[in-house]
Image (cartoon, rainbow, N blue to C red):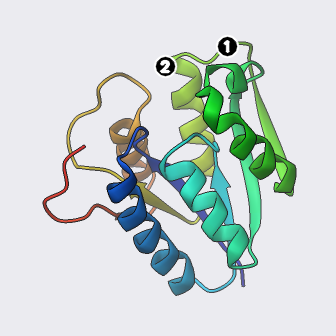
């Protein structure tokens, strides 16, 4: 049976922190056996997760918050985004033109609703704005979806 795992997590991680998160995500993906990963494919935790799922032979579902989402991603990251998107077996495009906190929250909710469990690369702190990692974790918990928080002890973002 395939486990549908969603990801939510911070962006703008240092290279050192991202490497540790990569190890933690790969271990979590491996623990779940056959995995379908659900991700918004943003830079940071989302991309690390998507690559780990693909490397493990899993299927990738991309949930895009808005039609102009790519334009809001860092220029240097866009080729990685394009490559991950091209490998997605399913793409869910939300109705928004440009991403805003509401679009991000709806994308997070859609990922949770399509998943059996949520991985959260989260420092445990309140969100910096609506629609972020803390809000997606709260939504998953309110829906009874199991949440696994992945954050290296003592790490600060």
Q: Residue at position x 67%, y 13% from top?
A: 98
Q: Residue at position x 64%, y 27% from top?
A: 75
Q: Quadrant of residue 58?
A: bottom right
> Which residue bears the numbered disc 2?
101
Location of the N terminus by quadrant is bottom right
76 lies above or below 7:
above
Q: Cα distance, mark 1 to mark 2?
A: 10 Å
| Location of residue 113 in the rendering, given as x and y in whole percent from the top left corner | 61, 49
Horizontal side of residue 154 vs 1, given as left or right = left
Q: Secondary structure at mark 2?
A: helix
Is residue 147 visible in the rendered image? The answer is: no
Q: Residue at position x 55%, y 76% from top?
A: 29
Q: Quadrant of residue 35?
A: bottom right
| Location of residue 155 in the rendering, given as x and y in whole percent from the top left corner | 19, 56
| Location of residue 131 in the rendering, given as x and y in whole percent from the top left corner | 44, 28
> Which residue bears the numbered disc 1?
98
């Amino acid at each position: 049976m395939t486990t549908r795992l969603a990801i939510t997590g911070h962006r703008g991680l240092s290279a050192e922190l991202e490497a540790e998160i990569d190890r933690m995500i790969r271990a979590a993906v491996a623990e779940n056996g056959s995995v379908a990963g659900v991700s918004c494919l943003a830079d940071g935790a989302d991309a690390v997760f998507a690559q780990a799922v693909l490397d493990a032979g899993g299927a990738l579902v991309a949930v895009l918050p808005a039609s102009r989402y790519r334009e809001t991603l860092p220029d240097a990251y866009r080729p990685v985004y394009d490559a991950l998107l091209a490998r997605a077996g399913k793409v869910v495009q939300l109705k928004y033109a440009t991403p805003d906190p509401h679009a991000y929250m709806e994308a997070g909710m859609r990922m949770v609703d399509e998943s059996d469990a949520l991985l959260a690369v989260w420092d445990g702190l309140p969100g910096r704005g609506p629609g972020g990692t803390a809000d997606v974790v709260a939504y998953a918990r309110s829906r009874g979806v199991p949440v696994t928080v992945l954050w290296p002890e003592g790490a600060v973002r």
